[in-house]
Amino acid sequence: MNFKYRSGAAALRGLSDGTCYFAHAGELNDSLEAKFAPAESFSYTRILAQTLTELAAQRKEPARYEPEEKNADIFSKLIREEDKIFEANCQRVGIFSGTKRPDNQPMWAYYCNDGRGVCFEFEWSWEVLKRFSLRPTFVHYTDQPRVHDRFEDMREELLVLGDKHPDWTVEQLYEYSQTQEFIAGWIARSMSRAVSTKHSDWAHEHELRMLSPRAGPLPILKQILKRVYFIRTDFPEWGPIMMLLHQLYPDVKMARVTFSHTEPLVSIQNLEAKLVSITQSADGFT
């Protein structure tokens, strides 16, 4: 579950076409989105040897692995070429930015035009995640230089594989790590981390992202929208938003968020929509 703050116009547009838009990194408001430097090329052989040695120790195998130094220059050139492909693919990822809660006051101010908008509550089913190959990830915030080592993610995938198959030898684990299936999982993990690391200045957003293999709109809003929060009704899109919710999203709930300087500082009131019949009399509507 996560939440998305929307201006009135953006909310109306999304409700009208039933889509969620997954943006390119370059379309987001942080100019450093998905920007990172690659790790040194020797990181691969060093981390691989370290991880295989650790897995061998877990299995009581006597083997100790050392980084491969043979053909180091050729291997380094190959790693650098792969780094460029990896970086280019990261720029193609679609990013759908959400957050952890619907009562973040700065978010209402930044993304909802001082409350003249709404906050969507989403519930992502396994069926939606699988059908569109979506991957949820929390954003990691840091004030350190961004050096991304994709081989750290290879290590994590190998350790997970080792836990999943405790009866496999290290040689079997290594052989499987060369398969397309393993590499696809490793790269997906690494790309998720690469495009979800931001400077600590953004930490107040508590961002939870959903990532898509490609940027663009996905027709999933009706499947994931569960509740709509609001704090104000004095903006032009309010009426049309309520009409669309009634017409196209009859099962979606409504809630009003209220902020105060006294207790309770924040309150959320769940609301129920009610239809009022209108009849025509001789002198007008009643």
Image (cartoon, helix red, strand yellow):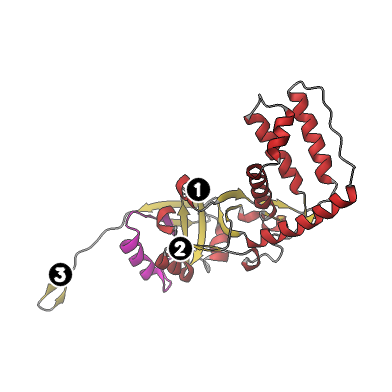
Tag 1 and tag 2, C-beta contact below 8 Å: no
| Residue carrying label 1 | 130
CA–CA distance in space, label 1 to label 3: 48 Å
Residue at (47, 50) in percent of width and height: 128
Of mark 2 and mark 3, the one earlier in the sequence is: 2
Q: Is residue 155 left or right of residue 265?
A: right
* Amino acid type, label 1: Lys
Residue 279's disc is 3
CA–CA distance in space, label 1 to label 2: 17 Å
- Closest to the observer, 81 or 94: 81
Instruction: Provide residue 51's location: percent of width, then percent of height.
Output: 77, 34
Give the extent of the magenta segment: 227-256
Crowding around mark 1 (Cα neighbors within 10 Å: few <14, some 14 to 19, many 20+) is few
Above or below, 85 relative to 44: below
Crowding around mark 2 (Cα neighbors within 10 Å: few <14, some 14 to 19, many 20+) is some
Residue 47, image quadrant: top right
Q: Is residue 233 left or right of residue 56?
A: left
Q: Is residue 163 left or right of residue 224?
A: right
